[in-house]
Image: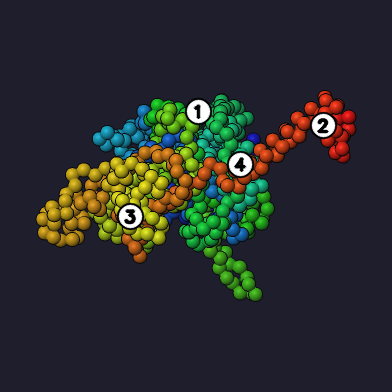
Amino acid sequence: MRIHVTLLCLSLLLVVAMADVYMHAPPGSNDRNQEEGTNRDNAQRLFNSQNNDRGGYCRGGIVRWYEKSYLPVEWTSQHGCGNNQNDCNVILQYMCGSTNDPALTNIRDGTVTTTIPNDPAQVATMSGSEYQFGMHESYEYYNNCTTRSRNKGLFTANQNVQNTARFTRQQTGGTQYGFECPEERDYYPYWAPSPWKDIAIFTGDTDNCKMYKAQSQNVKSKYYCMFPGRATNNPASIDPAECTSKGGQWVEQPSWGIGAPECLKAEWNHVNHLGLSMDNGRYTSYNWSLPHQGMEDCIQSDTCACVLRIRYNISSSEVKGFGSSAYDSRNNGNNSPIKNNPNVLVEGQNLTLNINENQYGRTFQDRSHTFAIRPRPSSLKDAKIWNIMVKGKRGNIQQAYPAMEYQFTPSQITMKKNEYVHFQWTGCDHNPAGNAGNGRNKLDRSNLVQIHSLGYGTPFKDDDYTSKNALLTDPADRLRFAQQDQVGCKSYAQLMADNNNNQNDIEQDPQNCAYLNAAPNTFDGGVHKMDRTGSFYYMSTRNHDFSNRDQKGAIHVTPLLQTWQIALIAVGCTLFVGLATAGGSIAYAKTHPHSSANRFFSKVPGVKRVVA
């Protein structure tokens, strides 16, 4: 088993350097909850992101996407991927549970920013009707990790790594980050059972795709040692023979049985830049087909609480170039290819390199807040549904960074006639006070009104709508998307009277519905069938602020068949009819030797033998 683990680790993902990753759609938390500071309060709340404290979006409401609908996942990574300056991997994973699960396994956001205590009694602490502490991985999972032997076949350089899976070369101190298992976080594919299910893998080297797919827990069972006396000072072995020799039981956890993850070539992204893909000029993204009832029991009962995770890994050519042995324990200690901040000679002169052994091989990650996946009604059973949401947070570009200012996402989408769109978004009520924006301070709010093109900054007038150009054909829907279900609105005369004509106070008034101040933080606009072809453009009146920020989007609806496809089918049909007619005539000529048809085909080279 030791040899097996070592060989497996030859292809594990190892990362290097400062290389933050931020998920923007759906909004990544970066360990935030609802704190109002520029920096997050606690980098250990749920998971070890390794990211800058400024990153992340604070928690809004729960969004509820339909099973098997398409969700755009978008992210930025500091050192890029798919370029020739690093070797990279990006892994998308998710897990779901039921809101009815007991406290020790219940996936939730929690109400505080404090790390969940490693105490089963405190795990269940309530704050009103909600659990106080956020939790993704379960209490049992974390305690299995802290009492399981770490993989001693791994490359650890000169780091002093203790004996359990709680300790890694990247995290030698064993600090608790939620109930995350540090060894599982740092290595993929992992050899022990994990609650995470694989969605997709993006790699700079697609030669590894076969291995990734085969080793995924989606399709491969994982094993662990059930050992009654396991403890931090007596950890359970990851070797089956050693496990059973000590009185343990080697237990199989069956695969998830949901099919291997997709494995794709990573898009080309620039280094030192949280920006766009060089391949297509858009943010790096993936259209995730959400799980269905056959994959998650909670969907049928409509009780899902789910989390999405992205992990980002880069490695350097120096380590890779040292050979595959660089990834196993034979290269630890004095044999390590890397040293902390070494001096190197260049033309006889010393130069110091910036190398940190516990970062030469490093994993970054981000996770969403919890969301729901709901069952489809019978009316949408076979529909193709595209989700459209809002990403970004309140603030100008400098205040929001490394997050983004508001944008619809996808910003532009092309779909076929009679497919569906589901408009749904959420925002936070706890952005830093004083961040730039329109409407009431601290609040994220968005609406949607139609515009003539992306160059416009003013919406349609009521008499501009026709049966052909309207994105939303029902005036009631147009009003709802514009006004966002607000109630208790004041007239402008009331606002002026109540605020002594002070424009700043008028803008901040909670009942100023023109700025969406009375809108809830979460909006579900429902599913709409795109039954007309053409392009439809829209914007948010609250957040579109010319020369400051731009929040617009477009839907392009194409025919079920393009013109060239129709022409090709027509040509094919014509040829088919022609060949069928000719075939019938030849058959008639063969059975009627005295007919004019027989005399005609008898004169055609290559055919006369058939009718003879």
Provide the residue designation for mark 3.
459
| Residue depth check, mark 1 versus mark 2: number of the one nearer the observer | 2
Residue contact at pointers 3 and 4, CB within 8 angstroms:
no
Q: Earlier in the sequence, mark 3 or mark 2?
A: 3
Residue contact at pointers 2 and 4, CB within 8 angstroms:
no
Find the distance from the CA under tag 1 to the CA under tag 2: 64 Å
Provide the residue designation for mark 1.
294
Provide the secondary structure element on which disc 4 rests: helix
Q: Earlier in the sequence, mark 3 or mark 4?
A: 4
Provide the secondary structure element on which disc 2 rests: helix
Query: Which is more toward the observer, 188 or 300?
Result: 300
Q: Earlier in the sequence, mark 1 or mark 4?
A: 4
| Residue depth check, mark 2 versus mark 4: number of the one nearer the observer | 2
Provide the residue designation for mark 2.
596
Residue flagged by tag 2: what amino acid is it? Ser
Mark number displayed over residue 212: 4
Q: Residue at x 34, y 45 (%)?
A: 426
Residue flagged by tag 1: what amino acid is it? Gly
Residue 205, percent from left and from top: 63, 50
Q: Residue at x 59, y 60 (%)?
A: 85
